[in-house]
Image: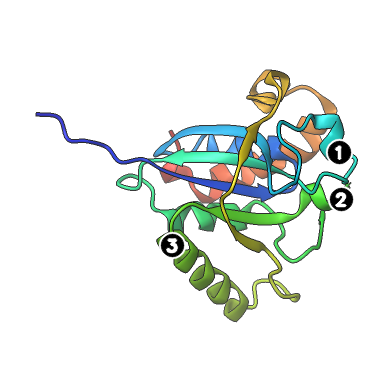
Amino acid sequence: MAEEINLETTILGGGCFWCIEAVFSELQGVQKAVSGYSGGKNDNPTYEQICSGKTGHAEVVQVTFNPKIVSFKEILEVFFTIHDPTTLNRQGNDVGTQYRSVIYYHLDEQKAIAQKTIKELEKSAKWSSPVITELSPFEKFFEAEAYHQNYFKLNASQPYCRVVIEPKVNKFKKLYFNQLK
């Protein structure tokens, strides 16, 4: 009899969702990485609406993973490697509340692991500024428009992909080469 696989889900935001999705789609144990919006007040927001910064949504990626292959702690380690969790509402040239660093947890255990991981990061002094990643319970996730899904894979030659996303993906692949799909 086949063993039942209990997948977990988390929602992560750390700047442009194209960057986060590109990395997590390559991580062993991740079943799906879907770009979308979370944390705002409007149902079914559009990209144009969230770009205004007025809806309260963040660009996020819904990461569905097998915790027997990749733990939530490992998911967070990758997450904190590929973005700067010390900048408020900004990642590089992407500025606005939609680009905030955020973890929307689904389980109390995820919340505890995230709190512990953030404390460890702050003690490590990896950054000279404090970690300001928002940690909130999951409420709603809205999948982004189809053209945002698998954006890096489908548009790798675009200037934004080459200049912003590709270096993050390459850094991830170098640091986590033994955990690639």
Q: Position of residue 30 (x, y in %)?
A: 44, 37
Q: Earlier in the sequence, mark 2 or mark 1?
A: 1
Judge the density around disc 2: few (<14), some (14-19), many (≥20) Cα neighbours within 10 Å.
some
Q: Are marks 3 and 1 in contact (CB under 8 Å)?
A: no
Q: Earlier in the sequence, mark 3 or mark 1?
A: 1
In depth, the one of 62 and 168 nearer the eye is: 62
**Residue 109 position (above or below residue 44):** below
Judge the density around disc 3: few (<14), some (14-19), many (≥20) Cα neighbours within 10 Å.
few
Gap between marks 3 and 2, in whole Å? 29 Å
Q: Which residue is disc 1 drawn over?
A: 51
State how many labels appear. Answer: 3
Q: Which residue is disc 2 drawn over?
A: 96
Q: Position of residue 72 (x, y in %)?
A: 43, 54
Residue 94: mark: none
In depth, the one of 11 and 171 nearer the eye is: 11
Judge the density around disc 1: few (<14), some (14-19), many (≥20) Cα neighbours within 10 Å.
some
Three-letter amino acid code of the residue under disc 1 = Cys
Q: Are marks 2 and 1 in contact (CB under 8 Å)?
A: yes
Single out the residue that lies furthest toward the left.
1
Residue 108: mark: 3
In depth, the one of 43 and 33 nearer the eye is: 43
**Residue 71 position (above or below residue 155):** below
Q: Position of residue 88 (x, y in %)?
A: 81, 62
Three-letter amino acid code of the residue under disc 2 = Gly
> Where's the C terminus, which quadrant?
top left
Residue drawn at x 52%, y 40% as measured from the top left: 63
The image quarter in which residue 17 lies: top right
Q: Earlier in the sequence, mark 3 or mark 2?
A: 2
